[in-house]
Image: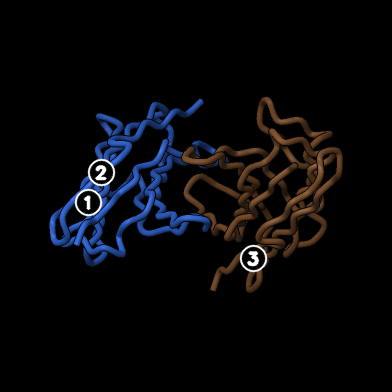
Chain colours: A blue, B brown
Amino acid sequence: GENVEQHPSTLSVQEGDSAVIKCTYSDSASNYFPWYKQELGKGPQLIIDIRSNVGEKKDQRIAVTLNKTAKHFSLHITETQPEDSAVYFCAASDTDKLIFGTGTRLQVFP
Amino acid sequence: GAVVSQHPSWVICKSGTSVKIECRSLDFQATTMFWYRQFPKQSLMLMATSNEGSKATYEQGVEKDKFLINHASLTLSTLTVTSAHPEDSSFYICSATTARLQAGDEQFFGPGTRLTVL
Protein backbone atom coordinates (compact mmCIF):
# COMPACT_ATOMS: atom_id res chain seq x y z
CA GLY A 1 0.00 0.00 0.00
CA GLU A 2 0.84 3.65 -0.19
CA ASN A 3 3.25 5.24 2.28
CA VAL A 4 3.76 8.99 2.56
CA GLU A 5 6.71 10.59 4.32
CA GLN A 6 6.77 14.27 5.22
CA HIS A 7 9.61 16.57 6.24
CA PRO A 8 10.34 18.55 8.28
CA SER A 9 8.22 17.76 11.33
CA THR A 10 8.60 21.33 12.59
CA LEU A 11 9.47 24.51 10.76
CA SER A 12 9.98 27.97 12.18
CA VAL A 13 10.27 31.00 9.92
CA GLN A 14 10.24 34.75 10.25
CA GLU A 15 7.24 36.60 8.93
CA GLY A 16 7.75 37.38 5.27
CA ASP A 17 10.09 34.47 4.64
CA SER A 18 9.21 31.43 2.55
CA ALA A 19 8.41 27.96 3.89
CA VAL A 20 8.84 24.69 2.05
CA ILE A 21 7.46 21.32 3.11
CA LYS A 22 8.34 18.15 1.25
CA CYS A 23 6.62 14.79 0.88
CA THR A 24 7.53 11.56 -0.81
CA TYR A 25 5.18 8.74 -1.72
CA SER A 26 5.73 5.12 -2.59
CA ASP A 27 2.88 4.07 -4.89
CA SER A 28 3.46 5.18 -8.47
CA ALA A 29 -0.27 4.66 -9.12
CA SER A 30 -1.20 7.60 -6.85
CA ASN A 31 -2.44 10.50 -8.93
CA TYR A 32 -3.97 13.01 -6.51
CA PHE A 33 -1.93 14.99 -4.00
CA PRO A 34 -3.76 17.42 -1.70
CA TRP A 35 -2.34 19.61 1.06
CA TYR A 36 -4.29 20.37 4.20
CA LYS A 37 -3.93 22.99 6.92
CA GLN A 38 -5.12 22.02 10.38
CA GLU A 39 -5.49 24.49 13.19
CA LEU A 40 -5.64 23.36 16.79
CA GLY A 41 -8.85 21.53 17.62
CA LYS A 42 -10.22 21.77 14.09
CA GLY A 43 -10.57 19.51 11.09
CA PRO A 44 -8.20 19.72 8.13
CA GLN A 45 -8.86 22.30 5.43
CA LEU A 46 -7.79 21.78 1.85
CA ILE A 47 -5.45 24.57 0.78
CA ILE A 48 -4.24 23.30 -2.57
CA ASP A 49 -4.08 20.08 -4.54
CA ILE A 50 -2.37 18.78 -7.64
CA ARG A 51 -3.04 15.91 -9.98
CA SER A 52 -0.45 13.76 -11.66
CA ASN A 53 -0.92 15.29 -15.08
CA VAL A 54 0.32 18.65 -13.77
CA GLY A 55 3.81 19.55 -12.57
CA GLU A 56 3.06 22.75 -10.71
CA LYS A 57 0.08 24.69 -9.42
CA LYS A 58 -0.09 28.07 -7.77
CA ASP A 59 -2.73 29.91 -5.79
CA GLN A 60 -1.63 33.34 -4.58
CA ARG A 61 1.07 32.74 -1.93
CA ILE A 62 0.80 28.97 -2.08
CA ALA A 63 2.26 26.66 -4.70
CA VAL A 64 2.70 22.93 -5.05
CA THR A 65 5.15 21.10 -7.27
CA LEU A 66 5.06 17.45 -8.26
CA ASN A 67 7.88 15.25 -9.55
CA LYS A 68 6.31 11.97 -10.59
CA THR A 69 9.60 10.39 -11.57
CA ALA A 70 11.08 10.95 -8.13
CA LYS A 71 7.71 10.47 -6.44
CA HIS A 72 7.85 13.60 -4.39
CA PHE A 73 5.81 16.76 -4.08
CA SER A 74 6.33 19.98 -2.20
CA LEU A 75 4.34 22.83 -0.71
CA HIS A 76 5.73 26.33 -1.01
CA ILE A 77 4.36 29.24 1.00
CA THR A 78 5.77 32.65 0.19
CA GLU A 79 5.54 35.85 2.22
CA THR A 80 4.50 33.92 5.29
CA GLN A 81 2.21 35.54 7.85
CA PRO A 82 1.55 34.67 11.51
CA GLU A 83 -1.87 33.31 10.53
CA ASP A 84 -0.12 30.68 8.41
CA SER A 85 0.97 29.05 11.67
CA ALA A 86 -0.67 25.62 11.82
CA VAL A 87 0.00 21.95 11.13
CA TYR A 88 0.20 21.07 7.45
CA PHE A 89 -0.45 17.60 6.09
CA CYS A 90 0.27 16.25 2.65
CA ALA A 91 -1.65 13.27 1.32
CA ALA A 92 -1.63 10.94 -1.64
CA SER A 93 -4.63 9.25 -3.15
CA ASP A 94 -4.22 5.53 -3.58
CA THR A 95 -7.24 4.14 -5.43
CA ASP A 96 -10.06 4.80 -2.97
CA LYS A 97 -8.52 6.53 0.03
CA LEU A 98 -6.18 9.30 1.14
CA ILE A 99 -2.93 8.39 2.85
CA PHE A 100 -1.64 11.24 4.99
CA GLY A 101 1.88 12.32 5.77
CA THR A 102 3.00 12.76 9.36
CA GLY A 103 2.46 16.51 9.42
CA THR A 104 4.59 19.63 9.71
CA ARG A 105 4.08 22.15 12.46
CA LEU A 106 4.77 25.57 10.95
CA GLN A 107 5.39 28.52 13.21
CA VAL A 108 5.65 31.99 11.71
CA PHE A 109 7.16 34.52 14.07
CA PRO A 110 6.22 38.19 13.68
CA GLY B 1 -20.58 25.00 -0.44
CA ALA B 2 -19.39 21.48 0.49
CA VAL B 3 -19.79 21.89 4.24
CA VAL B 4 -19.50 18.94 6.59
CA SER B 5 -20.61 19.16 10.21
CA GLN B 6 -20.03 16.89 13.17
CA HIS B 7 -21.93 16.55 16.40
CA PRO B 8 -21.01 16.70 19.15
CA SER B 9 -17.83 18.75 18.94
CA TRP B 10 -16.66 17.20 22.16
CA VAL B 11 -17.89 14.50 24.51
CA ILE B 12 -16.78 13.05 27.83
CA CYS B 13 -18.05 9.63 28.83
CA LYS B 14 -17.42 6.96 31.41
CA SER B 15 -15.54 3.81 30.58
CA GLY B 16 -17.86 1.07 29.34
CA THR B 17 -20.48 3.36 27.84
CA SER B 18 -21.22 3.92 24.16
CA VAL B 19 -20.92 7.19 22.31
CA LYS B 20 -22.46 8.16 18.98
CA ILE B 21 -20.89 10.78 16.71
CA GLU B 22 -22.81 12.22 13.77
CA CYS B 23 -21.37 13.45 10.49
CA ARG B 24 -23.57 15.43 8.13
CA SER B 25 -23.04 16.88 4.70
CA LEU B 26 -25.01 20.12 4.83
CA ASP B 27 -25.23 21.21 1.22
CA PHE B 28 -24.43 18.17 -0.87
CA GLN B 29 -25.17 14.49 -1.09
CA ALA B 30 -22.31 12.36 0.15
CA THR B 31 -22.29 8.91 -1.33
CA THR B 32 -19.02 8.10 0.42
CA MET B 33 -17.95 9.12 3.90
CA PHE B 34 -14.73 8.40 5.73
CA TRP B 35 -13.95 8.21 9.42
CA TYR B 36 -10.51 9.10 10.72
CA ARG B 37 -8.93 9.01 14.15
CA GLN B 38 -6.20 11.42 15.18
CA PHE B 39 -4.17 11.06 18.37
CA PRO B 40 -2.43 14.14 19.80
CA LYS B 41 0.36 15.44 17.59
CA GLN B 42 -0.14 12.61 15.13
CA SER B 43 -1.50 12.27 11.65
CA LEU B 44 -4.96 11.24 10.53
CA MET B 45 -5.46 7.51 10.36
CA LEU B 46 -8.31 6.17 8.26
CA MET B 47 -10.61 3.92 10.25
CA ALA B 48 -13.28 3.05 7.72
CA THR B 49 -14.99 3.98 4.49
CA SER B 50 -18.75 3.92 4.19
CA ASN B 51 -21.00 4.10 1.19
CA GLU B 52 -24.64 5.04 1.54
CA GLY B 53 -26.81 2.00 1.95
CA SER B 54 -24.03 -0.54 2.29
CA LYS B 55 -21.75 -1.88 4.98
CA ALA B 56 -18.63 0.03 5.90
CA THR B 57 -15.18 -1.15 4.90
CA TYR B 58 -12.82 -1.11 7.85
CA GLU B 59 -9.08 -0.64 7.75
CA GLN B 60 -6.83 -3.34 9.07
CA GLY B 61 -6.66 -3.31 12.83
CA VAL B 62 -9.93 -1.44 13.34
CA GLU B 63 -12.54 -3.49 15.19
CA LYS B 64 -15.81 -3.30 13.31
CA ASP B 65 -17.80 -4.50 16.33
CA LYS B 66 -16.36 -1.74 18.46
CA PHE B 67 -16.66 1.09 15.96
CA LEU B 68 -20.11 0.79 14.42
CA ILE B 69 -20.69 2.86 11.31
CA ASN B 70 -24.08 3.57 9.78
CA HIS B 71 -24.44 5.51 6.54
CA ALA B 72 -28.20 5.42 6.27
CA SER B 73 -28.72 8.45 4.06
CA LEU B 74 -26.85 10.58 1.57
CA THR B 75 -26.31 13.28 4.18
CA LEU B 76 -25.69 11.41 7.41
CA SER B 77 -23.17 8.91 8.71
CA THR B 78 -22.79 7.93 12.35
CA LEU B 79 -19.91 6.40 14.25
CA THR B 80 -20.73 4.64 17.50
CA VAL B 81 -17.87 3.79 19.83
CA THR B 82 -19.17 0.87 21.86
CA SER B 83 -17.94 0.00 25.34
CA ALA B 84 -15.51 2.91 25.23
CA HIS B 85 -12.24 2.74 27.15
CA PRO B 86 -9.66 5.41 27.94
CA GLU B 87 -7.49 4.26 25.03
CA ASP B 88 -10.35 5.23 22.68
CA SER B 89 -9.91 8.85 23.69
CA SER B 90 -9.00 10.67 20.50
CA PHE B 91 -10.07 13.24 17.93
CA TYR B 92 -12.49 11.67 15.47
CA ILE B 93 -12.87 13.35 12.08
CA CYS B 94 -15.19 12.51 9.22
CA SER B 95 -14.97 13.48 5.59
CA ALA B 96 -17.26 13.14 2.62
CA THR B 97 -17.11 13.06 -1.14
CA THR B 98 -19.79 13.95 -3.61
CA ALA B 99 -19.44 11.01 -5.91
CA ARG B 100 -18.41 7.40 -5.87
CA LEU B 101 -14.79 7.81 -4.98
CA GLN B 102 -12.22 7.65 -7.66
CA ALA B 103 -8.62 8.59 -7.15
CA GLY B 104 -8.57 12.35 -7.20
CA ASP B 105 -11.96 13.13 -5.67
CA GLU B 106 -11.70 15.88 -3.09
CA GLN B 107 -12.73 14.98 0.43
CA PHE B 108 -14.47 17.60 2.53
CA PHE B 109 -13.64 17.32 6.21
CA GLY B 110 -15.75 17.94 9.27
CA PRO B 111 -14.51 19.94 12.26
CA GLY B 112 -13.85 16.84 14.36
CA THR B 113 -15.15 15.43 17.65
CA ARG B 114 -12.96 15.25 20.72
CA LEU B 115 -13.78 12.09 22.70
CA THR B 116 -12.50 11.71 26.25
CA VAL B 117 -13.20 8.46 28.06
CA LEU B 118 -12.74 8.58 31.83
Residue B36: where, in percent of width, then height?
Answer: 61, 44
The residue lying at 45 percent from left, 59 percent from top is A45
Task: Identify residue for label 1.
Answer: A76
The CA distance from mark 2 to mark 3 is 31 Å
Of A31 and A81, the residue lying toward us: A81
The 10 Å Cα crowd at callout 3, few under 14, some 14 to 19, many 20 or more, is many
Marks 2 and 3: which is nearer the front? Answer: 2
Asked if disc 2 and disc 3 are in contact, CB closer than 8 Å, the reply is no
Do marks 1 and 3 share a chain? Answer: no
Q: In the picture, which quadrant includes the C terminus of chain B?
A: top right
Q: Amino acid at mark 2?
A: Leu
Q: Amino acid at mark 3?
A: Ser
- Is A46 rendered above or below residue A27? below
* Chain where mark 2 sits: A
Marks 2 and 1: which is nearer the front? Answer: 2
* Chain where mark 1 sits: A
Residue B10: where, in percent of width, then height?
Answer: 67, 57
Q: Secondary structure at mark 1?
A: strand
The residue lying at 43 percent from left, 42 percent from top is A91
Q: Secondary structure at mark 2?
A: strand
Task: Identify residue for label 2.
Answer: A11
- Is A53 rendered above or below residue A77? above
Task: Identify residue for label 3.
Answer: B5
The 10 Å Cα crowd at callout 2, few under 14, some 14 to 19, many 20 or more, is some
Residue A53: where, in percent of width, then height?
Answer: 32, 47
The CA distance from mark 1 to mark 3 is 30 Å
* Chain where mark 3 sits: B
